[in-house]
Amino acid sequence: MKFMDKLKSRFTQTEEKEETSTKYKEGMKKTRNSFTGKINDLIARYRKVDEEFFEELEEVLISADVGVTTVMDLIEELEMEVKRQNIKDTKDMKDVISEKLVEIYYGEEEEEPATLNLQNGELSVVLVVGVNGVGKTTSIGKLAHKLKGEGKKVVLAAGDTFRAGAIEQLDVWGERAGVDVIKQGAGSDPAAVIYDGIKAAKSRDADVLICDTAGRLQNKVNLMNELSKVKRVIEREIPGAPHEVLLVLDATTGQNALLQAKTFSEAVEVSGIVLTKLDGTAKGGIVLAIRNELNIPVKFVGLGEQVEDMRGFDAHAFVYGLFADMLEEEGE
C-alpha cells in the first residue's frame, strides 16, 4: 500500500479524524496552492527523475520556507530513496516526498502527536512566551478554552504588564473561556503577578495555571532576563515547574520565526511551539524547519480565527493538508 493511500485511509476511519483532516485541508489552502501547485508543475515538466529535477525541487521546498538545512537533508534522503527503489518516473515522486516529510518531522520517535505535559492530581504550570504581535494572548485564551472543555480547572496569570492593553485583552479571553484571570496594574513586576497567580491557582484547586509574559522590553537582553526571573519564581514555588514552556510563533513570518525560536530557547527551555496563522501563509514548511533544526515539537497550530481553531499538531494531518488535492485527484 502506497504511503499516500495510507495517509488518506488514516483520515477517513472515524468522524473525528475526518473532521481533523478537513480542518487541516481548509487551513493549509494557501501553502498547498503554492507548494503542490509547484510540485505538480515540476512533475509535468520533467518526465524523468534526474539532477535538474532535484535542483528545481530544492527551490520549491525552500520557497515554502522548509529551511535550507532541512531541504538539504530532505533532498539527500530523497536521492537515496530514488536509488533504493529505482524510481525513474517523476510521477512516482509524490508518494516518496510525502513519506519523507512525515519522517523528517517524527524522526526516530513514536508517530504520535505531541501532547501537553500536564501533572496528575497537582497544579500544572504552563509558561507562554513570544514577541508581541504573534498572537500570544489569543493563543492563551484558546488554550484555556480547550483545556476547560476537557474538564480542567484553569487560571490565567496576566504577566505581560508592559504592553498597553495586554492585561485587558487577557481579561476578555478569560471571560470568553470562563476562567479566572489573576492580574495587577500596568507596569507591575511580572514575576510578582506570576507569584500571585501560583498562590491563587493553588487556593482555588486549579489543575492548570497558564502564565502570559512580556513580549518586548527596551532590548532583547532585558526581555530574556525578565523571562529567566519569572521562570526562577515558578521553580522556587513549585519544584519541577514550569511543566511546559510554549513559544508562540507567527507562521507568516517564515524564517524569522526560526530566529525567534533560537533566541527564546537560549533564555528559557522551550518545550513546545504554538504556531499561529498557519492558515494565512503560503510558507507552512516552517513547521518542518522548526522541528528538524531546533528539535522542538510543534504542539499546537492556529488554523483559523475561531476559538476552537487552535488544534493539537499532527504531522500526518499536516502532510495530508499539504497533498489533499493530489490525493483527491488520485481517488477520482
Image (cartoon, grey):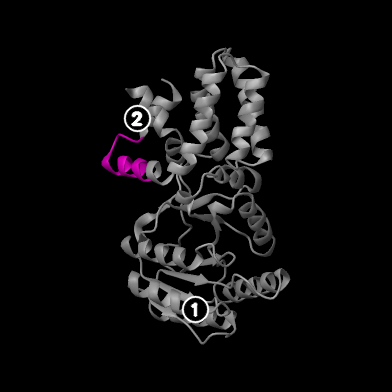
Q: Which residues are magenta?
A: 11-23
Q: In the image, is residue 17 part of the stretch drawn in magenta?
A: yes
Q: Residues within 10 Å of mark 1 (few under 14, many from 20)?
A: few
Of labels 2 and 1, the one closer to you: 1
Can you see residue 253? yes
Nearest to the observer: residue 136 or residue 115: 136
Q: x and y percent of residue 330 in the render?
A: 38, 22
Q: Main secondary structure of the magenta part?
A: helix
- Left or right, 22 with respect to 209, comes to left
Q: Is residue 236 above or below residue 129?
A: below
- Left or right, 97 with respect to 201, comes to right
- Left or right, 91 with respect to 18, comes to right
Q: Residue at x 33, y 71 (%)?
A: 176
Q: Residue at x 51, y 20 (%)?
A: 44
The quadrant where residue 168 appears: bottom left
Q: Residue at x 57, y 67 (%)?
A: 132
Q: Which residue is label 2 attached to? A: 9
What's the amino acid at mark 2? Ser
Q: Is residue 275 above or below residue 103?
A: below
What's the amino acid at mark 1? Gly
Which quadrant of the rendered structure holds the N terminus?
Answer: top left
Q: Which residue is label 1 attached to? A: 165
SS class, disc 2 = helix
Q: x and y percent of residue 259 in the render?
A: 67, 54
